[in-house]
Each structure stands twice: as C-alpha cells, then as structure tokens.
Image (cartoon, helix red, strand yellow):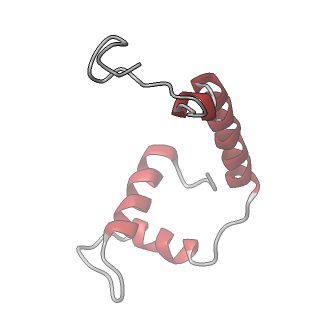
Amino acid sequence: MSAVESGGVLAPVRAAGRVDLADVLPSWRTLAVFLVLLAAIRLGYFALAGIYPDEGYYWLWGRNLALSYYDHPPLGGWMHGLTGALFGDGIL
C-alpha cells in the first residue's frame, strides 16, 4: 500500500518489518515523569550541596556592582546582586 492510497501524501507507509518512531519512543507521560524526577533530584542536590569556593568572590561582586571587574565580565556580579535583592543573602 502506498502513502497516497493510505490517506494522503504524508501518511506513514507500514511495510513488513518497518518500525515507526512512535513504537520506539516512550509516551509523553513517561517523559514527563522522568523530567519531574530529574528536576527533584537536581533541586535536592542544590539544597544539600555546599557553597562553591568562588561563590564568596562573586557575592562580593554582587554587593559592589560595577560595569566590569578585573578578570570577568559583569554578568556574574549583576546576577548575584539581583538574586540577593530578590531572595536575600541565604545559601539558596
């Protein structure tokens, strides 16, 4: 049976031994559960992980905002300043 005979030009052609992509991939619900589980693991890791040694250095940049720093562009300092203003100076 050709694609045109089965209902249109883009309709899938099922030949003997041919596998559709939908037969191989998991359902969207399985993927959603996997992504939620992965996000929960990452959030747990972030909550329990220690502070990276350079974070104190970047925190100082956030407290003293400038247009440029000695060896880095200002994005790190500005992001730390923004998150500090929104969420306070806690670990998270």
Which residue is more in the foreground, 53 or 2?
Answer: 2
76, 23: nearer the viewer: 23
Rendering coords of residue 74 (x, y %): 31, 72
Q: Residue at x 29, y 17 (%)?
A: 4
19 left or right of 11?
Answer: right
- Asked which quadrant contains residue 25, the reply is top right
Q: Is residue 26 above or below residue 44?
A: above
Q: Position of residue 13 (x, y in %)?
A: 43, 25
Q: Is residue 78 above or below residue 20?
A: below
Residue pushed farthest right? 48
Judged left or right of residue 92, residue 58 is left
Depth order, front residue of 10/14: 14
* Residue 53 % position (x, y): 63, 77
- The residue that appears at 44% across and 44% down in the rendered structure is 86
- Horizontally, residue 67 falls left or right of residue 41, namely left
Q: How many marks?
A: 0
Q: If the image is split into quadrants, where does the N terminus sit?
A: top left
Q: Residue furthest bottom?
A: 70
Q: Residue at x 64, y 41 (%)?
A: 39
Residue displayed at 64% across by 56% down: 91
x and y percent of residue 16 in the render? 58, 29
Residue closer to the observer: 90 or 26: 26
Instruction: Indicate left or right for 52 with 50 as reference.
Output: left
